[in-house]
Amino acid sequence: MCAANKKYDEKMLKDYKDMWLIRKFEDKIYQLYSEGVLPGTIHASTGQEAVAVGICKQLRKDDLMFTNHRGHGHTLMKGAEAKRMFAELLGKETGYCKGLGGSMHVADTENGVLGANGVVGSGMPLAVGAALSLVYNGRREDNDKVCVVFFGDGASGAGVFHECMNMASNWNLPLIFVCENNLYGMSTPIKEQGSIENIADRAAGYNMEGVTIDGNDLELVKETAARLIQKAREGGGPSLLECKTYRYNGHSRGDKPYGIYRTKEEVDYWKTEKDPILRYEKVLGLSDEEIKEIKKETDAIIDEAVKFAMESDALSPEDVLQYVFA
Amino acid sequence: MRTITYLQAVREAMEEEMERDEKVFVIGLDVGTGLTFGVTTGMIDKFGKERVIDTPIAELSVAGVATGAALNGLRPVMEVMLQDFITLCMEQITNQASKARLMTGGQLKAPVVFRAPGGWFGSFAAQHSQSLEAWFAHIPGLKVIAPSTPAEAKALLKAAIRDDNPVAFFEHKKLFGRTGEVSEYGEDYVIEIGKADIKREGTDVSIITYSNMIWEAMDAAEELAKEGISCEVLDLRTISPMDREAICETVKKTGKVVVAEEGVETGGVGAEVTAIIADEVYAYLDAPVKRVACPMIPIPFNPDLERFVVPNKDNIIDAVREVING
């Protein structure tokens, strides 16, 4: 590789690799599900990788994060290990939650991930509470941590979205609301769920900054997230960041990518014209050979992680009781 | 020992715990003035608005804010104005606070107390008079307390605040003005959660109940004593986890049981007590268990009709005679 022609630094290359890590992680889950190895349901974030990479990697390890049912990418990018993620998704004791939480509930407190939610919108009140705990009773003098909460466009119709923006703004909390607008709440187009074009416009009603961006443009996501996080860190209060993006799979394992509420043409358009990985490849100017090598490296990471999960044991029934009460 | 009201006892429990532990705070509607019943009145002068936090009227999100703050290490006591309004909080209590421990494989705990006065008060009508303890007893991971005396209210609320798990703490509006002997301020008297208490010793029949219905039972026992019927009154105090041992002990002693509650009969607390008896001490019964509870009717506004629907000592007396006479 000729250094003089390089359009990127090592951090950017790592971001590119991380997008592949998420994509291959999600693809592997679908494969394991189809093989009957992975129980339960799946909500994959394939296609939305730039949001996870662009936002979570701007956070420090001690910053707090709440994610939603489509949160594997967020949690990986906040610092979780793929092997313990897979172990959780396969219900093993070596998983982050001992196999008691599964795909929708991966928490990794060591990395500030205080949980993922299976109830749409419900992470927001928890995030307001966690952000409140960061400023509670003079605590801001000792820390400059922030909290980030992820939710989808569907959650913007929930009462908690509005209640929480109201409180976060009124209390000037160090909290960033991140709406991953993938244009559909399950099968219902966002246009049929509200009368506004941009969800971030809602922020104005709560005296909060709202920003709508192309969530598949990694550099733009990084830059915007960095600014809003810094603002919250410095006492500038909460903000609402809307990242417009697209999921390639169905809402869950239960629906196909297209045919019922989306057309093949629409899905193909996003995959070819708007794909965050393809776009970033161009930004970086990677060669086919380099791309091939990165994909191979990522496959090896995923394979090793799955091997770890498969070889792990499940918690025994008599041990479950000890996790009901603290 | 001093004589204070139940309301003062509840306030003292919070004040003592807030003095003992800076992480304890109060949050809810109008807690600054304590306008509703006066429970929190004056606390803001002692602890400031940083620790006595007024919120918008957004019960669901506030329940989540309290839970989220607890997940990050604080010990919130949320006041819900009336037990009827805690229905708005059910998602956060049921899906978030009560499940956080297990879902995260023990990584998180949610030491949050939800305080809510329930019960009839005199023509407060259908949306201000309910006793919904049974709903909460049906949630694993949550403890449910409903004390009947000032001393127990104080000692059990202190225990609830110190508990590392979410606790629903139900006062009764009729009890707020009741007086009783309570240890001196700062004496730090705490009662273990999950232990019932015999409020009156007896040999012929056991009346098992809790909260304000204890006093109806005590009056009934007094009257029945004049007829030579000796009633034992068992105060459950904690609805979940229920003190199965105490229930079985009193049944073994008397062989006859009346279970009384102010909530509705179907799926009620009494149904659970009766089922425990059937499971564990059926052979000791000399007569079928009799339940006294609210019929499946929303509480009417009209004072006479309300008195007809809400159970009282006369219903308990009738039930006792029925189990005695067969």
Image (cartoon, coloured by chain):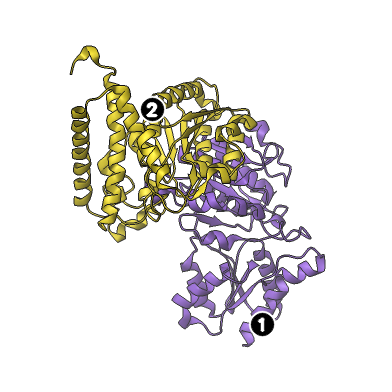
* Coordinates of residue B213 in the picture (x, y in percent): 66, 65
Picture quadrant of residue B135: bottom right
Q: Is residue A153 above or below residue B126?
A: above
Residue sitting at x 56%, y 84% = B287
Reading the image, the residue beneath label 2 is A218
Q: Which of the pair A252/B14 is nearer the observer?
A: A252
Amino acid type assigned to the residue bearing label 2 in the image: Leu
Q: Which of the pair A87/B159 is nearer the observer?
A: A87
Q: Is residue A305 above or below residue A227?
A: below
* Coordinates of residue B306 in the picture (x, y in percent): 77, 67
Q: Secondary structure at mark 1?
A: helix
Q: Secondary structure at mark 2?
A: helix
Chain designation of label 1: B
Label 2 crowd (10 A; few <14 / some 14-19 / many >=20): many
Q: Which of the pair B164/B108 is nearer the observer?
A: B108
Q: Is residue B209 above or below residue A261?
A: below
Label 1 crowd (10 A; few <14 / some 14-19 / many >=20): some
Residue sitting at x 28%, y 18% = A9
Which color is chain B depicted in? Answer: purple
* Coordinates of residue A252 in the picture (x, y in percent): 40, 51
Reading the image, the residue beneath label 1 is B321
Task: Name the mark nearer the viewer: 1 or 2.
Answer: 2
Picture quadrant of residue B326: bottom right
Any part of residue B138 in sight: yes
Any part of residue B49 in sight: no
* Coordinates of residue A161 in the picture (x, y in percent): 57, 40
Measure how far apart labels 1 and 2 are at the Cα level.
Answer: 77 Å
Chain designation of label 2: A
Which color is chain A depicted in? Answer: yellow
Residue sitting at x 72%, y 38% = B33
